[in-house]
Amino acid sequence: MKGAVLILLLLPRLADVNTPRELRRIPGDGQARAIRIVTWNIDHGSHLDQVTEELRKSNADLCLLQEVDWNAARSDSKDVAFELAERLGMNISYGVEFEELSQEKNGAAYIGQATLTRLPLIQSRVLRFQHQSTFWQPHFWLPSSIPLMQRRLGSRITLVTELQFAGSPLVVYNPHLESRSMGRIQTQQLDEILADLQQRYPAGTSAVIAGDINSKYFPSVFLHKLEKAGFRSALGERIERTHVIAMALDWIFVRGPFSLDEGTVQRSAKGSDHYPITASLKAR
């Protein structure tokens, strides 16, 4: 594994990593009928030991993580996603969102989404949204080397992972929607996820949408939009703060013949400025 990771770290530019990086460590149990899910924006993975401990405590079979660094200075140039997969003994898919220009002390640095699972990982892909903010782009009059400026190459994505659960396909969307705009771009990107699900998979395919929706503006609008599309929130009708300041940003939504129990925001968790959400998913 270490040799493979070293080769991946030598990839030079963003275009080379538009295909997700995958590692299948275990065969997984595709017949399992109950799993634990956690979604968490881990704030780059800068506090990796704390993040690892919290994920271990969650006892999750499916972890959807956002803001996951790869070779960034702020997280000690670690390959955070694959380090977590090794520590937790899980299969993994990792998709690049941005190349982080201010973090490149030891070559190109990236940030993206990671999906870790004990279920069989069939395949994965990156859905790079058509609707984007230009706020993060580098400009000649802004120094890209200063972290505060957050100059980036790339664009917002959702990492799409196809798994097997309870003997059937389960499509998992791990999004990190735009944080800028008053909700317009977030809504457009969510529409792209729903369109992808409708166009690429048979009607009624079971699906999970879980991640950082950035629903700080009118979160109930996003809740009701996904309910109308046949999804249920792990928190029911509750809108709960998932950030240390005051915002409802993170969600777990599920569609399919499942019961969805014990949705909880883990506000005692350490290691990020977001709180993880956990839930139990059971096949009926």
Image (cartoon, rainbow, N blue to C red):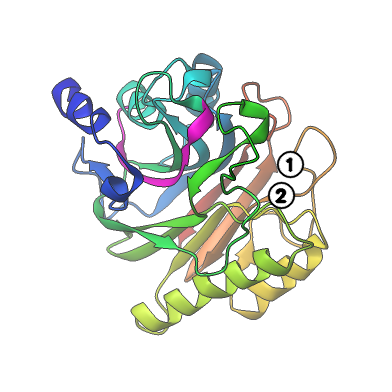
Residue 148 image-quadrant placement:
top right
Q: Position of residue 214 (x, y in %)?
A: 69, 53
Mark 1 → mark 2, Cα distance in angstroms: 6 Å
- Location of residue 150 with respect to 268 vertically, above or below: below
Q: Secondary structure at mark 2?
A: loop
From the image, give the main secondary structure of the stretch colored magenta. Answer: strand
Q: Which residue is mark 2?
A: 249
Residue 88 image-quadrant placement:
top left
Drawn side of residue 232 relative to residue 105, left or right: right
- Location of residue 1 with respect to 180 vertically, above or below: above
Residue 10 visible? The answer is yes
Which class describes the residues within 10 Å of circle 1: few (<14), some (14-19), or many (20+)? many
Q: Position of residue 227 (x, y in %)?
A: 66, 74
Q: Which residue is mark 1?
A: 242
Drawn side of residue 18 relative to residue 76, left or right: left
Q: Position of residue 59 (x, y in %)?
A: 47, 32
The N terminus appears in which quarter of the rendering? top left
The reply to whether the C-beta atoms of the residues labelled 1 and 2 are less than 8 Å apart is: yes
Residue 174 visible? The answer is no
Q: Which residues are magenta?
A: 89-102
User: Outermost residue, front direction?
Assistant: 140
Amino acid type shown at disc 2: Leu
Task: Identify the residue shown where x is 44% and y is 25%.
Answer: 104
Task: Identify the residue shown where x is 49% and y is 35%.
Answer: 100
Q: Secondary structure at mark 1?
A: loop
Q: Which mark is residue 166?
A: none
Is 185 or 166 nearer to us in this picture?
Answer: 185
Q: Position of residue 115 (x, y in %)?
A: 40, 44
Amino acid type shown at disc 1: Thr
